[in-house]
Amino acid sequence: MSAIRRPKQEYHEQTTRRMERHLPTPEWNVRQKVALACRILAADGHESALAGQITARGEKPGTYYMLRFGLGFDEATASSILLVDDDLNVLEGEGMPNPSNRFHLWIYRVRQDVNCIIHTHPPYVSALSMIGEPLAVAHMDHTMFFDDCAYLPEWPGVPIGDEEGEIISKAIGSKRSILLAHHGQLVACSSPEEATQMAVFMERAAKLQVFARAIGPIKPIRAELAKEAHDYRLKPKAVGATFHYFARKILKTEPEVLE
Ligand SMILES: [Zn+2]
């Protein structure tokens, strides 16, 4: 009996169809997704006291969800997510937003495709940010960053002003992510699910880059294969399933996150 051989494109299409049919989509609202994203990143080692932020567009134009300032990612619940306007005035919820979130607003203004931004200072991304090198995309698991991770080689200072917002929003351009020298990472994505996946995997990519550089030079991968894998890893249903998996791990022990 001869083996079945088909063009690879057929398998891509078949996989997309099957994902659409079989992968469930939980009914969480944006507040719940932002709170889950906070807990997922805390569990993944992105916690850095009060540094780092996760924001998402609200349903009304010019409104944004963000965690109440003073709480760590590991303390987030849906009810601690504030709704603010585009000058960081609180519209719904108690407390104040993180003043550093101002630079997110600059990105939302110029990127209509962006619905969620995550900025963190996890250890391996931070280490990589100190040596003057962009993120290397040379492993299959990190191809979601292929031609999709910008690099800001100069540190513009603490991002609480408008100048930093302008610099970072220009530097990321139309890409989904950026490595910020002497600072950390930022991802600007179409959904909380996609942003969470990108933030988690950017730290893993940086970790492998640190490991690989210790044992030898990093060899590049072929651009056309990297592009194919990039698109495969970012299929919305696959991204949703990855978020759902991360969320289930949190919900086993921290179900209050949805309240
Ligand atoms: Zn920062």
Image (tube, rainbow, N blue to C red):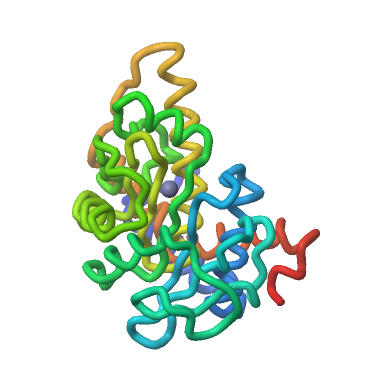
Residue 45 drawn above or below residue 61: above
Total label count?
Answer: 0
Does 193 sit left or right of 219 as displayed?
right
The residue under the point 45% across, 24% down is 210
Residue 219 position within the rendered picture, expressed as x and y whole percent measured from the top left: 31, 21
The residue under the point 36% across, 56% down is 160
Q: Residue furthest right?
A: 253
**Residue 246 in view:** no
Residue 176 drawn above or below residue 89: above
Residue 99 drawn above or below residue 148: below
Q: Residue furthest top?
A: 215
Examine the image and state in which quarter residue 161 appears.
bottom left
The residue under the point 33% across, 60% down is 103
Q: Nearer the viewer, residue 162 or 242?
A: 162
Q: Nearer the viewer, residue 27 or 161?
A: 161
Residue 104 drawn above or below residue 155: below
Residue 128 position within the rendered picture, expressed as x and y whole percent measured from the top left: 40, 29
| Quarter of the C terminus within the rendering | bottom right
Q: Nearer the viewer, residue 127 or 237?
A: 127
**Residue 176 in view:** yes
Residue 205 position within the rendered picture, expressed as x and y whole percent measured from the top left: 45, 36
The residue under the point 65% across, 64% down is 76
Examine the image and state in which quarter residue 180 appears.
top left
